[in-house]
């Protein structure tokens, strides 16, 4: 075999060969090597060609596959191989024009069809080999969620999270082994969930119902301080909202949160979009552990936490698109090192609550330009039999966007 596609990537369902297209069946019949998980190879049986089961990690199989370049190779995967599937992994080593892709129906599509849900209106989440906490931001009133499970224990974990957050009235459906003879679809409420003997191959569907007082994460920056575990070292919600507005997060960007304290800035940066990344840099060990707990509790388990002082902690870090300095502003050379780390068009936002740090920001503003703002917030409090304004400490914010 020479020129054109030599690898055929086939999506297969629980109905096995019966659900394959004629083109997929021909590719299997002509293959010299067929690669897949044991379950997929069994679904495609009988297979006349040599077979290779995926090792762990999957990348260990790539040399054997690439050694067959130019011969007829088939890779079998679940459903749509480019929807939380192996297709992306293969494309890291094999050009798309070398592959013929014959996708099947994804588990999400099958679940939506069984439930009569509009797929484009659903939150689609994979909990298979991914942190469970990624589910948390999606738990919004009225949301319809389809979650690909890790195994048969996942539905119970989803229900536990729902009830813990006051979402026990949510409607839950467990869809097992869809498309095959073992298919089963069962319904329950989160608070009345009693489903047992759940197949490892399942999708959990949730229609979120929030009771009064339910713990639901707001969608905008400036979440209440009691959303976070902290020791008082936390950017206040109004100031935090202004900091995030100044940082202007965009999809997929990386933030360095310097002097992270509770981690609130980095966490809210990541909550702005699922593709956003953040590194929290904090010198105190007790606070770094607290940041990790907050990241899990608020559904951003991929937050990277670095224990150490800045700017020494910058060594070896991926370059950011934005930097927030909330602590350590008086450290010699910190501002200069932060600016040096930013690419053209990067954003630096620094806050000062002490006169010493404020003086440094004023000098930085004079030297580099940007925007200098004083943020003053007051809250109404009882004053005798009346109400009066009690001002919080003013915060000076310096923002600079590097030259393009």
Image (tube, rainbow, N blue to C red):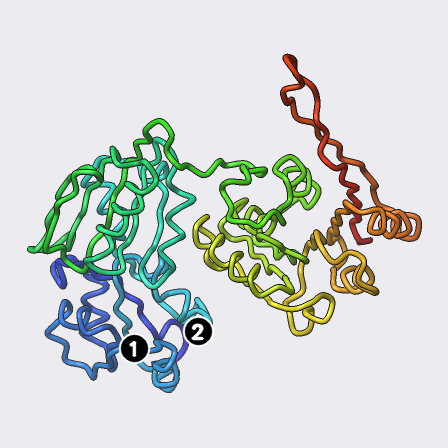
Q: Residue furthest front?
A: 384
Q: Which mark is residue 73?
A: 1
Along the horizontal axis of the image, is 80 left or right of 277? left
Instruction: Pinpoint residue 199: horizontal percent, then vertical percent.
Output: 14, 57
- Please identify the quarter of the rendering in which residue 34 is found: bottom left
Choose top left, top right, bottom left or bottom right for residue 93: bottom left
Judging depth in this view, the residue of 278 and 327 nearest the camera is: 327
Q: Residue at x 12, y 58 (%)?
A: 15
In this view of the protein, which residue sits in the foreground, 337 or 57?
A: 337
Give the SS element for disc 1. Answer: strand
Q: CA distance from mark 1 to mark 2?
A: 12 Å
- Secondary structure under tag 2 reads loop
- State the residue at coordinates (50%, 36%): 219
Q: Quadrant for the N terminus, please.
A: bottom left
Q: Is residue 288 left or right of residue 77?
A: right
In terms of sequence position, does the residue under pointer 1 or pointer 2 come before the other? Answer: 1
Q: Residue at x 51, y 46 (%)?
A: 228
Q: Quadrant of the C terminus?
A: bottom right
Q: Residues within 10 Å of mark 1 (few under 14, many from 20)?
A: many
Q: Which mark is residue 94?
A: 2
Q: Which image quarter: residue 91?
A: bottom left
């Amino acid at each position: 075999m020479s020129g054109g596609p030599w690898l055929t990537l086939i999506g297969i369902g629980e109905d096995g060969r019966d659900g394959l297209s004629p083109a997929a069946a021909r590719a299997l019949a002509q293959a010299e090597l067929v690669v897949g998980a044991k379950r997929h190879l069994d679904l495609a049986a009988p297979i006349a060609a040599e077979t290779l089961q995926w090792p762990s990690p999957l990348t260990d199989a790539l040399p054997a596959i690439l050694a067959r370049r130019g011969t007829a190779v088939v890779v079998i995967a679940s459903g749509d191989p480019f929807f939380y599937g192996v297709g992306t992994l293969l494309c890291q080593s094999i050009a798309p024009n070398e592959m013929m892709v014959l996708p099947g129906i994804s588990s999400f599509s099958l679940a939506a069809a069984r439930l009569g849900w509009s797929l484009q209106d659903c939150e689609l989440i994979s909990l298979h080999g991914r942190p469970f906490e990624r589910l948390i931001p999606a738990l919004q009133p009225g949301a319809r969620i389809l979650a690909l499970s890790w195994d048969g224990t996942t539905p119970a974990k989803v229900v536990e999270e729902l009830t813990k957050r006051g979402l026990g009235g949510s409607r839950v459906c467990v869809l097992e082994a869809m498309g095959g003879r073992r298919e089963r679809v069962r319904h329950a409420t989160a608070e009345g969930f009693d489903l047992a003997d759940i197949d490892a191959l399942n999708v959990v569907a949730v229609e979120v119902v929030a009771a009064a007082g339910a713990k639901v994460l707001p969608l905008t920056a400036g979440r209440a301080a009691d959303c976070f575990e902290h020791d008082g070292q936390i950017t206040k919600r109004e100031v935090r909202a202004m900091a995030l507005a100044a940082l202007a997060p965009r999809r997929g960007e990386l933030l360095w949160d310097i002097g992270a304290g509770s981690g609130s800035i980095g966490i809210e940066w990541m909550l702005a979009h699922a593709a956003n990344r953040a590194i929290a840099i904090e010198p105190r060990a007790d606070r770094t552990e607290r940041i990790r707990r907050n990241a899990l509790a608020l559904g951003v388990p991929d937050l990277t936490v670095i224990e150490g002082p800045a700017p020494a902690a910058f060594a070896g870090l991926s370059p950011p698109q934005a930097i927030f300095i909330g602590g350590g502003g008086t450290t010699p050379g910190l501002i200069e090192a932060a600016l040096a780390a930013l690419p053209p068009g990067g954003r630096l936002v620094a806050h000062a609550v002490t006169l010493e740090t404020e003086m440094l920001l004023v000098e930085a503003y004079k030297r580099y330009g940007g925007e200098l703002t004083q943020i003053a917030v007051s809250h109404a409090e009882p004053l005798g039999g009346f109400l009066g304004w009690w001002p919080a400490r003013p915060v000076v914010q310096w923002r600079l966007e590097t030259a393009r």
